[in-house]
Amino acid sequence: MEGKIELRAGDITTLDVDAIVNAANNTLMGGGGVDGAIHRAAGPGLVEECLLLNGCPTGEAKITRGYNLKARHIIHTVGPVWHGGGKNEENLLAGCYRKSLLLARENNIKTIAFPAISTGAYRFPMELAARIAVNEARRFLRDNTELEKVIFVCFDQRTLNIYEAALAADA
Ligand code: ADP
């Protein structure tokens, strides 16, 4: 099971996987950070499809095609803004991973890549976010053997170090 979780440094938009996950906002109309990078790389077809989705609540996920990306699908999920931890942020972030993985299963997706949801503009602490990400992936992989690979894409060296520590820790 652990062999199915992989860490990768770099830009999520370049990955050749069944689905990449976007750390979107509630409008699903694009934004900064990884969201902007995904919309730029996917091209204008993406925002047209997103227009039809009526946004997305925090902690939930919706799926589109991948357009100009190598990835066949994009799963858009909306992470919580970090307000200090007393606003259900941890459960909402866990929900992003869980709902994204459930959508992947429904769409027969075998390989999926996640960015570090909420850890940029939304200011979620990276160590805690990485632990939640790894725990949710482990839990899902335990119960869903048809999923082949979960990749955590780390945009910088600090993120990679923190994910390595989270993977090294016990479930
Ligand atoms: P959020 O609003 O959910 O915090 P951000 O896009 O601001 O989303 O940041 C989420 C994480 O994605 C950050 O850790 C950031 O460094 C990372 N990131 C930004 N661009 C990319 C990219 N092209 N590929 C992978 N990760 C990225």
Image (cartoon, rainbow, N blue to C red):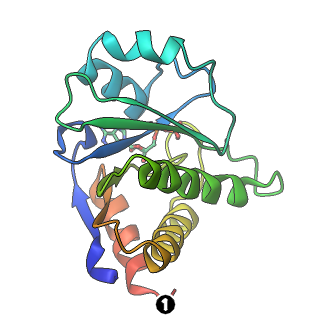
On the rendered structure, is 147 left or right of 81? left
- The quarter in which the N terminus is drawn is bottom left
Q: Residue at x 38, y 85 (%)?
A: 168
Looking at the picture, tell me which residue is in the foreground, 124 or 22. 22
- 121 up-or-down from 108: above or below: above
The outermost residue toward the bottom is 170
Question: Taking 113 as reference, is 56 above or below it?
Answer: above
* Crowding near the residue tagged with mark 1, few <14, some 14–19, many ≥20 C-alpha atoms within 10 Å: few
Give the amino acid type for the residue marked by disc 1 in the picture. Asp
Q: Which image quarter: residue 105?
A: bottom left
Q: Nearer the viewer, residue 98 or 120?
A: 98
In this rendering, the count of numbered labels is 1
Badge 1 marks a residue whose secondary structure is loop
Name the residue at 60% across, 20% down: 27
Residue 119 drawn at (x, y percent) = 51, 48
Q: Say if 24 sits above or below 88 in the image.
A: above
Q: Residue 79: x percent and y percent?
A: 60, 43
* In-image side of 152 versus 105 (left or right): left
- Which of the pair 93/102 is nearer the observer? 102
Report the front residue among 107 and 31.
107
Residue appearing at x 72%, y 53% in the figure: 89
Point out residue 43 in the picture as x, y percentages from the top left corner: 26, 15
Could you say which quadrant of the image residue 118 lies in?
top right
Q: Quadrant of ligand 1?
A: top left
Q: Which residue is mark 1?
A: 170
Mark 1 vs ligand 1: CB below 8 Å: no
Q: Position of residue 6 (x, y in %)?
A: 26, 68
Residue at the right extreme of this rendering:
86
